[in-house]
Image (cartoon, rainbow, N blue to C red):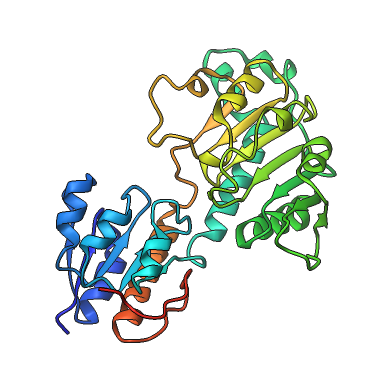
Amino acid sequence: MGFLVYIPQDIEEEGKKYLTEKGYEYKIGSDLSQETLIKGVKECDAILTRSNAMIDENVIKAGKKLKVIAKYGVGLDNIDVETATERGIYVTNTPEANANVVAEHVMAFMLALSKNLRSMDRELRKGNFAYRSERFSVDLENKTLGIIGLGRIGRLVAKKAFHGFDMKVIGYDPYISTSIPGIDKVGDLDQIFINSDFISLHLPLTEGTRGIIRNSHFKIMKPSAYFINAARGGVVNESDLIDALEQGEFAGAGIDVFEQEPPDKNNPLFKLENVILTPHSAALSKEGADRMSLHAAMQVDQVLRGEEPSWAVNKVLSKKA
């Protein structure tokens, strides 16, 4: 076929094997600097990218032969979709690859926080068996889970909480007007923060959502509530989150994503005992990563064969020179 696929950051073998079997060549990038990305894309027909490579206007314009930018994952904040669309380049993602993985990670946060697993483990290792009576856990049954963003992942979290743990689920999403089984929809963000025992974010990072969760929301949470973010760090004002946790305005948090990634080693979140942190790994189960690499490669193949991709996030009319 003569098509070349640029993969700035290595992916699992499933995706690379699929490309090879379809007759494509690929090259793996050496680093994620803008200079390297611009140089690497020049002769390529497609980019298959993870979240850390910034596929901005300069990179896209350097790819004179580009027909598709396939995202390994769901979030698109590292891709200039507008420039790609203007130049007739498809942008795709992998919405069916890792939704359940992320939902499971959120439930793990909820269980670890409610059962005090971090502190229980630490104290027992120090020989403090009596800690079992010093800090009781919290039931999930009959507690209220508030979900902000009712897309694929948010609905899966709701399903697991409602059917698996007998929780009440309320949700907020201004872009969804239909009813959703198991979720009582509310009219504004404040109702989520006021009424929930656990809050989980499932928002994309856009100019409209950047910093949307801030101090005014944390101040109206129940002191016993927990806050979970496995979406994008930028949707939360991180300094406000840190202040609220330090002041004990709510019980604790499970955080998988950060405003700056990787986060600075001196990030105050690392010092807080009432926080469980993971390194933007909610989507990265072995099975989920395999699926993301394969599904992204499938999107590349569809476009380079002249088909409309299954998971396009933009509408493409024609390619501009």
Observer able to see residue 297: yes
* Left or right placement of residue 265 versus residue 151 in this view: left
Which quarter of the figure is the C terminus placed in?
bottom left
Looking at the image, residue 146 lies above or below residue 126: below
Q: Quadrant of residue 119?
A: top right
One can see residue 31 in this view? no
Instruction: Name the residue: 30% across, 60% down.
Output: 12
**Which residue is at the far front?**
321
Q: Nearer the viewer, residue 261 or 97?
A: 261
Percent coordinates x, y for residue 117 in the rendering: 61, 30
Residue 278 placement (x, y as % from top left): 48, 37
Residue 140, position as x, y percentages in the image: 77, 41
Looking at the picture, tell me which residue is in the foreground, 139 or 178: 178
Which residue is at a point 80% across and 29% down the rendered structure image? 222
Instruction: Tell whether 85 sits left or right of 34.
Output: right
Against 275, residue 59 (above or below) is: below
Up the image or down, 43 lies above or below 113; here it is below
Residue 124 vs 165, above or below: the answer is above
- Left or right: 306, with 17 as reference point: right
Q: Which residue sits at x=30%, y=86%? A: 305
Q: Position of residue 142 (x, y in %)?
A: 85, 44
- Residue closer to the observer: 24 or 88: 88
Q: Residue at x 72, y 55 (%)?
A: 173
The N terminus appears in which quarter of the rendering?
bottom left
Locate residue 185: give its quadrant: bottom right
In screen coordinates, is 294 left or right of 200?
A: left
Q: How many marks?
A: 0
